[in-house]
Image: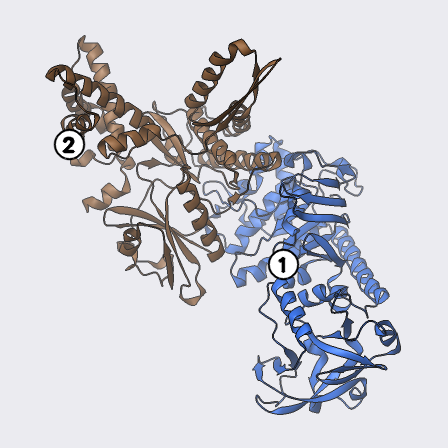
Amino acid sequence: MRYLFRPPGTDGAALLALPWHEPLEEWDPALLLEVPQRGISRHVVRFVAEQGRVFALKEIAEPLARHEYALLGEFEEEGLPSVSVLGICIDRPGGQDAILVTRYLEYSMSYRYLFSRPSARQSVDQLMDTLVVLLVRLHLAGIFWGDCSLSNTLFRLDAGALAAHLVDAETAERHPQLSRGQRHYDLELARERVGAELLDLQAGELLPDGVDPIDVADSLPVRYDRLWDEVTHEEVFRADEQRYRVAERLQRLNDLGFDVGEVELVTSDEGARLRVETRVSAPGQHRRELFRLTGLEVQENQARRLLNDLRTYRAYLEQRSGAPVSEAVAGARWLADVYQPVIDAIPPELAGRLAPAEVFHEVLEHRWFLSEQAGRDVGTTAAARSYVRTVLPATPEELTTPSVIANRS
Amino acid sequence: MASIEMKNIVKQYGDGYPAVNDVSLDIADGEFMILVGPSGCGKSTLLRMIVGLEDITSGDMVIGGKRVNDLAPRERNLSMVFQNYALYPHMTVYENIAFPLRLSKTPDDEVRRRVTEASDVLELKEHLERKPANLSGGQRQRVAMGRAIVRQAEAFLFDEPLSNLDAKLRGQMRTEIARLQRRLGITTVYVTHDQTEAMTLGDRVCVLRKGSIQQVASPRELYEQPVNLFVAGFIGSPPMNFLPATLEGDRLQTPFGPVVLDERRAAAVRGRGELLLVGIRPEYFEDATLVDEAKRPLGSVFRARVDVTEWLGDSQYAYIPYEAPEAVTTQLRALSRELDSEELRTQAIVSIDATSRIREGREAEFWLDSRKVHVFDPQTGENLTRDAEAGARLTQMATEDRVEQVQDAQASGQTVSGATTGGGQGSGAHRAGAV
């Protein structure tokens, strides 16, 4: 047998003791972890936990495994929202298929979960828009997915918003650029799959009344075309509108979840023509900034939220001491005095239902809500206590992320 | 159903590289056409241009008499079979087949009619009301085919559908696809790099090399009357042997002794250069001690030392090394590299009867059927002895077989009737835009 894995190799080394020579279907259940947040797969897929981390193992033909391994590696390096691939095991005895190992996307939710329970948090519209953002991002990067479906997508909460991640690249193809035909065909496949998946939930009586599978599926191309146009269209305007129009366009792209790369502005007597190159990577400016200051790894919107709180705290420190406080010091103090106490307030039995940064975001929301009721600022500590007592327990237990479950046992 | 006509199709990428170079190919209504060739030959690009995934640089793509160059994929109404294998667990097998129609809001009675017909052809009738969880591997694949059938597409397209299945399921599916295509009589284009798949499935096979068509013919014509060295080397397993030869009178001098050519072939070869390549298929050889006296004079006999023998129960192969000049080995090495095959060493693979007692490491006497050898120009690769008329007869026979089979299937009511009303032959113009 042969194992290929990407750095850090320690994750891969921890998995070497598993019975790779046996068919995945026959692995001792004691080695495996039940993961409720998963879609439909035509392959054998199993989950294992090793040293507190959770991995998804998928048995597929070697050429497909190699292809997917290479592509997912590329996607990760480019900052595309996809699962992170660890490695593959090939040349298994008896001519068995290869096994592809990916890191489980912690705190993610499957569409089955999201659709089958009406939630105040996310609407069907939001879900479809999120999926379309992912598809547009992939298409901009020259990736034909070939199997865009809800089953192949996982959703994560990001400061109340949703972010979609690609979890299956088996059929994906990389091109220098996609033709119109490729994009439309990919979209047509997506429409059909999403429709079928929702019809399936309906057949299983898991779809809330009022959600029409066909209408939802048919809305995909419309949403896609709208977003694609927003992201790629060239604009022409009068020279005197330039400054304001360029700024407006860039702001609009940011709001849609895209970072802007190069901006090309060609002026002539008729006016200015604006072409914007959109970065394919998911925005990460705030994420990187927060990581630099605190070492926390969170999602983009969460990072923006946390950074705002950090800055407020820094101002408070400066005001209190009457002297400037460096960014680095403020970051360390905020982490120890503000963020960590909130996270520590989560009782063990409620841990893992939401990502820590998401909990912090919700506590800030809760604080605002309580403060408004009380007519004064109640403070983060009181808000965290109240949140943990009244809000967090209402979050479904089945959302608990697998690594937390694995670490409990 | 519809015919597919390609006229001078060119696909050129940004860097100027022509992935497909001036391809003209007519696929008849109801025909099963295979596009085959080693990687990089342009077969997938060609299929993608039929589907509408790749823009066509120049030329015309005509489906059912209509030019489709500028139509989006869904407007072409073609069906990529096996594009969606997913089985949806809460839906019955019936709904798993029907959902493409549900999504296009097809009326219930029309859905029922089409699903029933498709399930008859696919022998899934008893399973329709069940959930898909307990279907076998083959049945699952048939559900995927059912989805393609109910769409009533103009044609079925397959892009290496079996390449990732295990050997057993691959064999099953090959049979299944062939049977289905015959019963439905639907125009089918099938891309593969596997010459065995190509030979067993297609009515006609289009062999591509570096974006150009080499030969379009029935499997038998390709096998017996290849146009050039490339086709001769690509079709057949184990491959055709190529030996260096020089012509003396009506005889070819080869490492395996003289081979006598008949007058037609001798005339065709004469004056075509000093050094030639003679192509001999493994089964044109035999252990000389086992050849009928009556047959013996039709070929030549030579002695050679056997390097290795492979006994497979029902058949046996012997490997015979031979000497070849540098020019020939270089040519053969380049060919095998292009065919993605293991390097052709300068040894012949010969098929001998399973009962033969020829041993490894010893000299033995072999017989060679000289009636069927071909002679190639090593520079251009051209087959100098190809009998075009004989080849055309083989392909004509295959075409007649196909027409007969489709008529039989239609007569016994096994085909899916489509949206055709009034009982006439189905044609593109009748199709209600399915998707």
Task: Between residue B105 and residue A373, name the one nearer to us.
Answer: A373
Amino acid found under the numbered disc labelled 1: Pro
Chain B, which colour?
blue
Q: Name the residue under label 2.
A: A344
Q: Is residue B385 above or below residue B16?
A: below
Q: How many marks?
A: 2
Q: Residue A381 occupies which quadrant of the picture? A: top left
SS label for mark 2:
helix
Q: Residues within 10 Å of mark 2 (few under 14, many from 20)?
A: few
Residue A42 location (% of width, % of height): 46, 49
- Check the picture and name the quadrant holding the N terminus of chain A: bottom left
Residue drawn 42% across and 23% down? Answer: A254
Q: Is residue B232 above or below residue A269?
A: below
Residue A77 location (% of width, % of height): 40, 42
Residue drawn 68% across and 73% down? Answer: B328
Amino acid found under the numbered disc labelled 2: Asp
Q: Name the residue under label 1.
A: B38
B333 sits left or right of A316 in the view = right
Report, in whole angstroms, how far the alpha carbon at label 2 lies from the one at label 1.
61 Å
Same chain, labels 2 and 1: no
Residue B342 location (% of width, % of height): 57, 69
Residue drawn 46% across and 46% down? Answer: A71
Q: Which chain carries label 1?
A: B
Q: Residue B280 occupies which quadrant of the picture? A: bottom right
Q: Which chain is brown?
A: A
SS label for mark 1:
loop
Task: Between residue B247 and residue B42, name the one nearer to us.
Answer: B247
